[in-house]
Amino acid sequence: MTLKRIKITNIRNLSQADLTPVSRVNILYGANGSGKTSVLEAIHFLATTRSFRTSQFRHLLSQGAQQALVFARIDPFSEQRLSALGVERDDQGNVKARYDGRTLDSAELASLLPVQVIHSGTFELLDGSPTVRRQFLDWGCFHSESAFITRWRSFKRALKQRNSLLKYGKIDPIQMQVWNREFVEQGQALTDLRDRYLQALIPEFEQILSVLLGDVPIRLGFSAGWDRKRALADMLDENFARDLQHGFTQLGPQRADLRFRLEQKNAADILSRGQKKLVVSALKLAQGSLYRRYSNRPCIYLFDDLPSELDDKHCRLFCDFISQSLDQCFITCVDPDTMTQFWASDIDLSLFHLDSGRLSHKVALGD
Ligand SMILES: Nc1ncnc2c1ncn2[C@@H]1O[C@H](COP(=O)(O)OP(=O)(O)OP(=O)(O)O)[C@@H](O)[C@H]1O
Ligand SMILES: [Mg+2]
């Protein structure tokens, strides 16, 4: 999947912007507040209909505008056959995604345009809430196993129904039994898919981390959300009184989490900020690498302020790694000199300059 042309209307300070990216490395540079992150936000919006920084769409929509629109020409299978994708969303909450004239639902859009973002908020993968880590894990499962989305939706439904019975305290035993059975069947299948995905992800993560960070023995582990010495069905039975008392299901796959350990301690408590950035980047890069393996298609990477937190050595290692992948990258930085020095002269690279919301010129490396 490669973006060949992007037209942006009403995303933050970009009232109109048009860019023709190259297939590999696109560097967006400009002063603070010029609109670099907004371009990444526009690409993320195209892929997901949402911002990666805020849950409130009104912050993504340009002030005073009623509707945001991002349109792109994309090359879905790297075959030079272009398709049209347009995503629009208005201030009333109406969202529309169209692909070659056909309306897409959110799952279709997500599988069409797999985007990975690395920005200051990505640190939450290490020190944020388990929800962030579950979303990360489930993104990988979604893109690697076609059965995942159905299992995930069925499990969510069973959990919601079970919680609603617990909340109102009027337990119809037949209904409870039905939802318990569904919770166990879907929850176990979901956990098996998560397990399988992690078995592939962990060696990939460790290998990339050793390239980016050297010999720092971080171990990635999985907590399924309950003590797996117990069968999920037995756990539900044993915890029923507690669930009833709290009014919702305490344990299960809805509580799954990833753990990062370094020398028997929580890695987030020990690592420096630069090291944390490399760890979360290695995770995202490992995910992209698995995605390519499963789908035979490249990912789109958005690196917001890539050089921040990194010294020259690690920045170079990062760029070397990106150079060897086949993904399309969009990288923001304030000063282009901090980024352009790290690439081989023959890499497919373009520079875009932003000035007060205007994407004013484009040059290739060496021009
Ligand atoms: N909803 C909005 N409507 C219009 N402008 C906005 C909106 N939200 C933010 N802005 C402005 O858009 C400008 C560009 O923000 P952006 O985050 O893209 O800058 P940036 O180039 O990434 O800056 P930095 O180098 O500081 O990260 C900022 O001046 C910001 O105040
Ligand atoms: Mg920015």
Image (cartoon, rainbow, N blue to C red):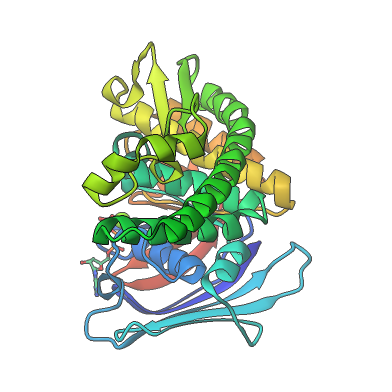
Image quarter of residue 98: bottom right
The residue sitting at the top extreme is: 263
The residue sitting at the right extreme is: 79
In this rendering, the answer to whether 119 lies above or below 84 is above
Q: Residue at x 50, y 43 (%)?
A: 137
Q: Residue at x 58, y 73 (%)?
A: 5
Q: Quadrant of the N terminus?
A: bottom right
Quadrant in which ligand 1 is drawn = bottom left
Q: Residue at x 79, y 65 (%)?
A: 79
* Residue 77 locus on image (x, y percent): 74, 63
* Residue 225 locus on image (x, y percent): 42, 36
Image quarter of residue 289: top right
In this rendering, the answer to whether 279 lies above or below 186 is above
- Relative side of 130 to 324, left or right: left
| Camera-nearest residue between 63 and 169 | 169
The number of callouts visible is 0
Q: Is residue 348 visible?
A: no
